[in-house]
Amino acid sequence: MAALLSLQNYTDSNDSDSDVDLEKDGFNAHLKPLDKPLLNIASSTALVAAPDVVSNEDTSGLRHIDPKTKELKYNPKHDELFAPTVGPINPFKTQQAQAVRNTLSGFAEPAHFSRFQFDNQRQTFSSYGFALDPTTDGSGATDKYIGDSDALEETEGKTVFEKNNQMEKAKKRKREKNTNASDIEGYLGPWAKYKDEETVSKPSEEEQKVLDEILAKRAKAGKQVEEKTVEEKSTLHIKDAYDYQGRSFLHPPQDVGVNLKSEEPPEKCFLPKKLIHTWSGHTKGIAAIRWFPKYAHLMMSAGMDSKIKLWQVYKERQCVRTYSGHKQAVRDVCFNNTGSEFLSCGYDRYCKLWDTETGECKARFTSRKVPYCIKFHPEEDKQHLFVAGTSDKKIVCWDIRSGEIIQEYDRHLGPVNSITFIDQNRRFVSTSDDKSLRVWEWDVPVDFKYIADPSMHSMPAVTLSPNGKWLACQSMDNKICVFNALNRMKFIRKKTFTGHMVAGYACGIDFSPEMSYISCGDADGKVYIWDWRSTKLYSKFKAHDDVCISVLWHPHETSKMATAGWDGVIKYWD
């Protein structure tokens, strides 16, 4: 500022006149001092050499305590304990969220009291109906009680853990007394009865009414209404039941180009290629088909239309006889060893024994449960016995002669689906919905082998190989599993046949007579044929419009096969 003022006073002698003129013109007007000294920065602003500075540090002398601290090693001041929390506040938190809390709902202060005192008051309240008021500290003369005031007076405020002699006396039951030992008849001693004791109690009139109603209901529910069985009848569909020599249709024909009486299977079997015949007669699906034993010149079918039909396999290939005697769908059929009789079981809960030739129903058996599978005992000397797997998890053995159950095999945990005799008919294998496979000794109602695995599925269809060594089981995870029937029922992991879709259906399996192929149907109505040795799928073809439930190779022919489906037809392939 001083420099500016000195510049203003500096003049040159040569230019004095011109300077005067310039001043007049206001040339140096900006160098003149201001008229108002108040607007001068120098005069209005005073510079302070040591200004007051506000410190960032806390100078209150208080030590800040972390709110999460549990223990302090010094005596804090009141201001330190109750000082607000240090640090910036989150502007987005609500007032509720900013509150100090140690539980989800708020801040719970720990309260310490005697466990015994708590239980004492709780039990007193539940027993007598009063307790100390929990809002008071429960000490001194200020004890307040809540609850039943009458009970409080009666017990004199004593809890369940305190003795109250008056109440004890009132509670104690009194005995009849006679301690005179000389009174032989009337002496009671310590064995006297209580005065209010009832030795024989009878229900009151109201209780008796209620009891009578309950008993009447039970009697009504317990009555098993005997269902009337359908009258069994049979229809012969051929003109002559006997030929000129007096032989019935059960006699095997000898002019069909194949020796039906031979014991040996064909040397080599071939894959069936074309359809040669279709049997139709059932109005609903077919549940099972069976060859006539030994000769296979006849075939039996069990239908869901509650009828059983017998068909010719050779010559005219017509229906020979129809057997109707079941109220509901027929589930399974089984011939005896000679084929003169057969068993059928259906959803009407009856097992029936029929004469194949005359169509007469010889006997009927029921355990009031649905039989799912039925089998004659294969031994000649035990042809009067048969077993049936039922819906109540049991395998029931019946004696045809007496019509009574002689044995029950009750170990399965689900309905029994199949029974197969193995090991020269000394044992049998059963499968069930409980996803297990059990092996039984004949007439021993305890399974000596139980096969179950978490990876196993239910196996509702089981077939024994012609040589009796292997057991093929249709597993519900779309596989055919094979077990060694002779060697401790070992699962043969390498022999697994896949590619078909059977989940939910008990599609039957069958081996070719000389064991080169294994075949089964599937849910789409196809037939699958695999090579037995290599487990390779050789052939598959569409056979039925609905589920193909059964496939049977002819035991004496080289390449003939019968298939049955839920479309109600049986087809014969070659």
Image: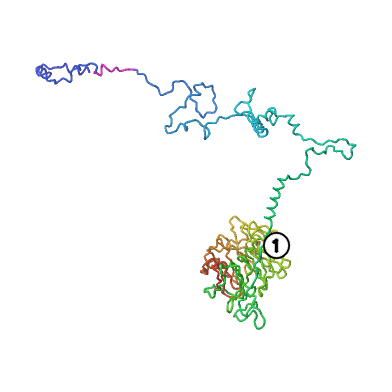
* Residue 84, percent from left and from top: 47, 25
Magenta residues (range): 39-49
Q: Position of 542 compared to 17: left or right?
A: right
Q: Which residue is mark 1?
A: 441
Asked if residue 43 lies in the magenta stretch, the reply is: yes
Q: Which amino acid lies under the numbered mark 1 shown in the image of this protein?
A: Glu
- Which residue is at the front of the view, 15 or 507? 507
Look at 42% across and 23% down and name the residue there: 57
- Which residue is at the front of the view, 383 or 486? 383
Asked if residue 230 lies in the magenta stretch, the reply is: no
- Which residue is at the front of the view, 315 or 476? 315
The quarter of the displayed image where residue 146 is located: top right
Above or below 239: residue 208:
above
Above or below 70: residue 344:
below
Callout 1: SS: strand
Look at 18% across and 19% down and name the residue there: 31
* Residue 151, percent from left and from top: 68, 30
Above or below 557: residue 127:
above
The quarter of the displayed image where residue 569 is located: bottom right
| Neighbour tally class for label 1: few under 14, some 14-19, many 20 plus, Cα within 10 Å | some
* Residue 191, percent from left and from top: 83, 39
* Residue 318, percent from left and from top: 58, 76
Q: Is any atom of residue 202 visible in this view?
A: yes
Q: Is any atom of residue 509 visible in this view?
A: no
The quarter of the displayed image where residue 130 is located: top right
